[in-house]
Image: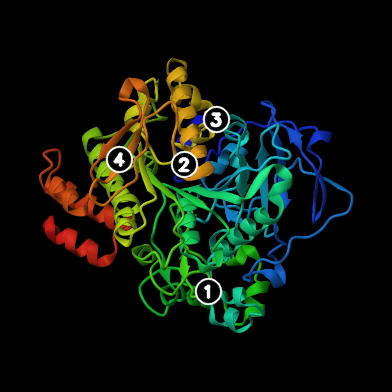
Amino acid sequence: MKSLICLGILLLVAACREKEMLPASSPGTARSLAQGEVVGFLAKNGAQVWRGLPFAASTAGENRWRGPRPAPEWQGVREALHFAERCSQLTNQSDEDEGLEAGLIIGSEDCLAVDIYSPADAQGKALPVMVWIHGGGNVWGRSSAYDGSRLAENEKVVVVATQYRLGPLGWFSHPSLRESATTPEDAAASFATLDLIAALKWVRGNIGVFGGATDNVTVFGESAGGHNVAALLASPLAEGLFHRAIIQSGSFDSTSLAAAQGFEGTLANTSMEVAKRLGVSKAEELRAVPLAELFAAYEQGSGFLDVPRVIEDGVVLPARPLREAFASTETFHTVPIMVGTNRDEMKLFYAGNPELIKKALGFLPVPHDQEFYDALTGYISRLWRIRAVDQPAAMMARAGHHAVYAYRFDWDDGGRLLSMDFKTLFGAAHGFEIPFVFNRFQYLGDADRFLFQDRTASERENLSRAMGGYWASFARDGLPSSPAGPPWPTYSEKGASFLRFDTDSDGGIEVAQGADTLEALVVDLKGDPRLDKVQRCRIIREMGEWMFTRPIYETVRAAVECR
């Protein structure tokens, strides 16, 4: 059943979607682009929609592992009613909703396209533009999972959802590819970041006809999408292409070029190792490898390809750790930045772990030990916030960049399905803020009626509209505000102010203060009465798997006296 399949997801996008009829084109959506004439359709709320508009050429064949080439032109009027094919990827449990078993290669190398959602009365205006970058570990996902029509119409912004190369096609570095480069960008390794830069250039050249302002563009993304926003902030090639940035549950980590290639470190699936498994060494041979063979050359982890990503290639990103860029205003784009996490990020990733979860009645996931489940997911969720919010925000503040706004999303008022309690199983899990930002409570398919119950509808709607207001006002002028909530103070190293988002019955939207630190986390972990030594050490090991660098891991392990 669809709800149970979706409960096992390991990374979130709103993947559970109902089948829909192909919409009819609307003459009022006719637009003229440099590529040709196009017509879209009207969403149910009146928003104008155009799907699958290519911003670059196919990346197959000779274009594989090269910088994106110019978008193709077309003859006649293009009906932008279909989504573009998703970028080539390996299926996982989340795709079973579509009747696709895990482990299949789906999608296309001809996938670089955007979907546009514009208010009904946008034509002739210059509205804020919000470019959404989907998540999925940078190995999975698609733009079609996100419907921006309500955000666009509610807040009078133009929403653009973009696709980009994934997995080994988006992140790959091999000496022969650099040697065969015909442009500076061809010598890159972070090809997915180049795709996002190409999408932003397309937006700058075309968004005006859709009612968007070319000089007021916000990039926002969740999870891997947020990670990619951080990369864009540090990429010299993205200068001037956007004017605000929102990082939702993202990351500031990166992979060195030498580690991605296999010349240092212990990463799995380095480019040199993959090429060796394939038995090829020349650029033309690599580009000719069938997708099935390429994907098969990678070891999989938890159903996802294990791929070095966000690579410090010296082309798209400087040849230094991404995190270090935010220590100086000379090395990142000092636009207004919003950054935040969800209180219970990690519950999404552990809700399907058989070591922690039993199946009541044979199919309902329930934690074996709720206290340990809460402790494990709680500490790693805190670590995520430290690494993705408090540390980088403090770095930017010390560097003199103060237009930084932090948040934490706390909504956890999911309902029950027999013995399965969404509140304790998921809480405020990874990605749960997305339905609130997009004002579309479609998330777990059939299980949505239990997660988003009627009893919470009014409060959810109020919180959603408030969050949409903050996001859109930030896009409008860099100052997030909403009549439904308090003024949002900037983060400062001293005050560490952030906005906590929740419904009125759980404290509402309020300003909170105080940075979390690794030192405080270690003190709490050592003294946590819920845990014995074995459990503490397991939490440390799990932290190391997720977000610790080796030196930090060794320091924390020693502090908690784990061997």
Indicate the position of residue 267 as horizontal and vertical percent values.
39, 69
Residue identified by numbered label 4: 356
Residue type indicated by callout 1: Val
Residue type indicated by callout 4: Leu
Left or right: where 340 falls relative to 45: left
Indicate the position of residue 302 as horizontal and vertical percent values.
43, 52
Verify CB contact (< 8 Å) between mark 1 and mark 4: no
**Camera-nearest residue between 168 and 43:** 43
Element assignment for label 3: loop
Residue identified by numbered label 1: 315
Q: Which disc number belongs to residue 9? A: 2
**Camera-nearest residue between 447 and 520:** 520
Give the alpha-carbon distance from disc 3 to disc 1, as whole Å: 38 Å
Q: Residues within 10 Å of mark 3 (few under 14, many from 20)?
A: some
Give the alpha-carbon distance from disc 2 to disc 3, as whole Å: 19 Å
User: Is residue 212 visible to us here?
Assistant: yes
Residue type indicated by callout 2: Ile
Tell me which label, 3 or 1, sits earlier in the chain: 1
**Camera-nearest residue between 188 and 64:** 188
Residue type indicated by callout 3: Arg
Seen at 28% across and 53% down, the residue is: 542
Tell me which label, 2 or 4, sits earlier in the chain: 2
Give the alpha-carbon distance from disc 2 to disc 4, as whole Å: 15 Å
Q: Which disc number belongs to residue 440? A: 3
Give the alpha-carbon distance from disc 2 to disc 1, as whole Å: 34 Å
Q: From what the image shows, is residue 191 above or below residue 355?
A: below
Question: Which label lies toward us, 2 or 3?
Answer: 3
Tell me which label, 3 or 4, sits earlier in the chain: 4
